[in-house]
Image: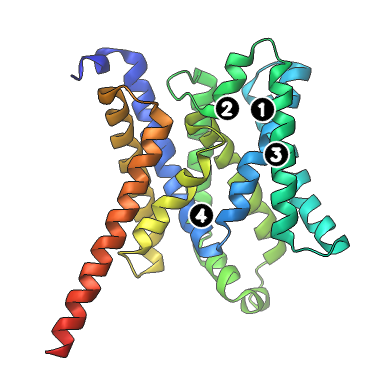
């Protein structure tokens, strides 16, 4: 059953899944606390035309893809703020409109690219097919993201919950927010190649949503969310290989199942505590 893991390529992909899962899980704590999963989901779709445009103009390269994704996310994010001020609808509505338009543009660009197979990996995910350069970029972004969030955890939490207080303490809240936004986009692009643009939202939100059901401490949320992401990605990779299923989709299904199980455990725990209190 596990003969497939005698192949170096599969062992390499499993390690990548666990590393990317831990990074996404760690970052998901910030996303859940910031209450911005829907905005991040819109950005996960909007980066696709940026990737497609760079590939059409300069070919498929890891650095080019990251730059294209950052540019597209910045345009859509800033465009949502601008048009929300000029229109009669809210920012999230404008973001949804721009996201769908951007994603549709990326799909049209995809049909014009002769080497569409490589570009489709960013749309649907192909963790086994990631190149050495892609993997090293993923590992580098993962180390950077985890380090930044760990070192700046206190000012980040202060900015999230008490921005005025954080500003009086000398925290440059606007700079911090923009820097974290850029960091999230880098992590998101790494996730795209692993599970695809369509499923990336679940991968970067669900781990912390799962841990939030069972852990009350914000301090432990980051670490245990990382562990949950790594565990879900690893089990999903193994399950997809055993049952011959799409790897990215199976990883997201496993992480989603972990969330549902956590909700059930919390309900049972709260029910038991309530009955015990009554007696």
Q: CB under 8 Å between callouts 1 and 2? A: yes
Q: Which quadrant of the view contains residue 174?
A: bottom right
Question: Residue at position x 51%, y 54% from top?
Answer: 149
Among the two numbered marks 1 and 2 on one chain, the one whose residue lies closer to the N terminus: 1
Q: Which quadrant of the view contains residue 36?
A: bottom right
Kindly state the secondary structure of the residue where label 2 is placed: helix
Kindly state the secondary structure of the residue where label 4 is placed: helix
Q: Which mark is residue 83?
A: none
Q: Label 2: which residue?
A: 122
Give the distance between the C-alpha atoms of the residues marked 2 and 4, in whole angstroms. Answer: 26 Å
Give the distance between the C-alpha atoms of the residues marked 3 and 1, in whole angstroms. Answer: 9 Å
- Name the image quarter holding the C terminus: bottom left
Q: CB under 8 Å between callouts 3 and 1? A: no
Q: Tell me the crowding category of disc 3: few under 14, some 14 to 19, or many 20 or more residues within 10 angstroms, Cα based.
A: many
Residue sitting nearer the eye, 50 or 135: 50
Q: Tell me the crowding category of disc 4: few under 14, some 14 to 19, or many 20 or more residues within 10 angstroms, Cα based.
A: many
Among the two numbered marks 2 and 4 on one chain, the one whose residue lies closer to the N terminus: 2
Q: Label 4: which residue?
A: 149
Residue sitting nearer the eye, 28 or 279: 279
Camera-nearest label, 4 or 3? 3
- Name the image quarter holding the N terminus: top left
Indicate the position of residue 151 as horizontal and vertical percent values.
50, 57
Q: Label 3: which residue?
A: 70
Residue sitting nearer the eye, 119 or 6: 119
Among the two numbered marks 3 and 1 on one chain, the one whose residue lies closer to the N terminus: 1
Question: Residue at position x 51%, y 58% from top?
Answer: 30
Q: Label 1: which residue?
A: 65
Residue closest to the far left: 279
Among the two numbered marks 4 and 3 on one chain, the one whose residue lies closer to the N terminus: 3
Q: CB under 8 Å between callouts 2 and 4? A: no
Give the distance between the C-alpha atoms of the residues marked 2 and 3, in whole angstroms. Answer: 14 Å
Indicate the position of residue 116 as horizontal and vertical percent values.
63, 15
């Amino acid at each position: 059953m596990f003969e497939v893991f005698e192949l170096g390529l599969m062992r390499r992909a499993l390690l990548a899944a666990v590393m990317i899962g831990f990074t996404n899980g760690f970052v998901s704590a910030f996303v859940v606390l910031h209450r911005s999963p829907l905005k991040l989901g819109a950005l996960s779709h909007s980066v696709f035309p940026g990737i497609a445009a760079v590939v059409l103009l300069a070919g498929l390269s890891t650095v080019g893809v990251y730059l294209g994704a950052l540019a597209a996310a910045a345009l859509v994010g800033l465009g949502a703020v601008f048009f929300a001020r000029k229109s009669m609808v809210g920012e999230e509505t404008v973001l949804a409109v721009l996201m769908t338009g951007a994603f549709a543009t990326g799909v049209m660009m995809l049909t014009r690219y002769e080497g569409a197979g490589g570009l489709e990996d960013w749309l649907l995910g192909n963790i086994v097919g990631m190149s050495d350069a892609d993997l090293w970029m993923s590992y580098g972004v993962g180390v950077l993201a985890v380090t930044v969030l760990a070192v700046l955890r206190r000012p980040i939490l202060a900015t999230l919950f008490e921005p005025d207080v954080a500003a009086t303490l000398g925290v440059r809240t606007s700079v911090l927010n923009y820097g974290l936004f850029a960091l999230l986009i880098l992590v998101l692009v790494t996730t795209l190649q692993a599970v695809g643009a369509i499923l990336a939202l679940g991968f970067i939100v669900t781990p912390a949503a799962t841990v939030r059901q069972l852990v009350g401490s914000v301090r432990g949320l980051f670490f245990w969310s990382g562990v949950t992401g790594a565990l879900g990605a690893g089990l999903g990779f193994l399950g997809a290989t055993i049952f011959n299923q799409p790897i990215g989709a199976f990883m997201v299904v496993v992480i989603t199942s972990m969330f549902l199980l956590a909700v059930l455990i919390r309900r049972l725990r709260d029910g038991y505590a309530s009955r015990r209190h009554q007696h």
